[in-house]
């Protein structure tokens, strides 16, 4: 195996020096790693987009309440009284109350 790695001059030569069983295993590993990276990236980007959208919606709501003439105390009470909607928000709220 070590001799196969030393004799390769390019990545393709390295790939063709493996037996068919080794190539199959290598392809499965590469596809699995690529899939994990893609899924992780999509999840992270989705979470960032969701958090950004939620923050923007909260800011728009606060701006609208200010435009209606409410003071900061009323806005703070309204925002804090809004129940968490998702599982993670409920869990985070429960963790905060326990401290």
Image: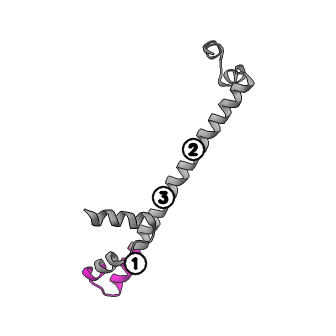
Say if the magenta span includes residue 35: no
Q: Quadrant of the N terminus?
A: top right
Q: Which residues are magenta?
A: 59-75
Residue 89: image location, x then y, percent: 40, 66
The residue located at (45%, 65%) in the rendering is 87
Q: Position of residue 11 (x, y in %)?
A: 65, 24
- The residue located at (72%, 26%) in the rendering is 21
Disc 3 target residue: 47
**SS at circle 1:** helix
Q: Main secondary structure of the magenta part?
A: helix
Camera-side mark, 3 or 2: 2
Q: Earlier in the sequence, mark 3 or mark 2?
A: 2
The residue carrying mark 2 is 36
Q: Is residue 97 above or below residue 66?
A: above
* Residue extending furthest toward the right: 20
Q: Seen from this angle, which residue lies furthest bottom?
A: 68
Q: Badge 2: few (under 14), some or many (20 or more) residues near its Cα, within 10 Å?
A: few
User: In the depicted view, which residue is nearer to us: 11 or 15?
Assistant: 15
**Cα–Cα gap, marks 3 and 1:** 21 Å
Please state which of residues 78 and 53 is positioned toward the viewer in this rendering: 78
Q: Nearer the viewer, mark 3 or mark 1?
A: 3
Q: Earlier in the sequence, mark 2 or mark 1?
A: 2
Residue 12 lies, in percent from the top left, at 69, 25
Other residues around mark 1 within 10 Å, as few (<14) / some (14–19) / many (≥20): some
Residue 17: percent from the left, percent from the top?
A: 71, 19
- Mark 1 — residue? 61
Q: Residue at x 26, y 83 (%)?
A: 71
Counting residues from the N terminus, which is met first, the one under dot 3 or under dot 1? Answer: 3
Asked if residue 73 lies in the magenta stretch, the reply is yes
C-alpha gap between disc 2 and disc 1: 37 Å
Q: Are marks 3 and 1 in contact (CB under 8 Å)?
A: no
Choose top left, top right, bottom left or bottom right for residue 83: bottom left
């Amino acid at each position: 195996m070590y001799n196969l790695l030393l004799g390769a001059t390019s990545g393709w030569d390295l790939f063709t020096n493996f037996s068919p069983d080794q190539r199959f295993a290598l392809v499965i590993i590469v596809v699995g790693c690529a899939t994990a990276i893609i899924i992780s990236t999509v999840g992270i980007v989705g979470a960032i987009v969701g958090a950004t959208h939620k923050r923007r919606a909260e800011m728009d709501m606060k701006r609208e309440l200010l435009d209606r003439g409410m003071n900061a105390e009323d806005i703070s009470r309204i925002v804090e009284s809004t129940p968490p909607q998702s599982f993670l928000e409920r869990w985070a709220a429960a963790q905060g109350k326990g401290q």
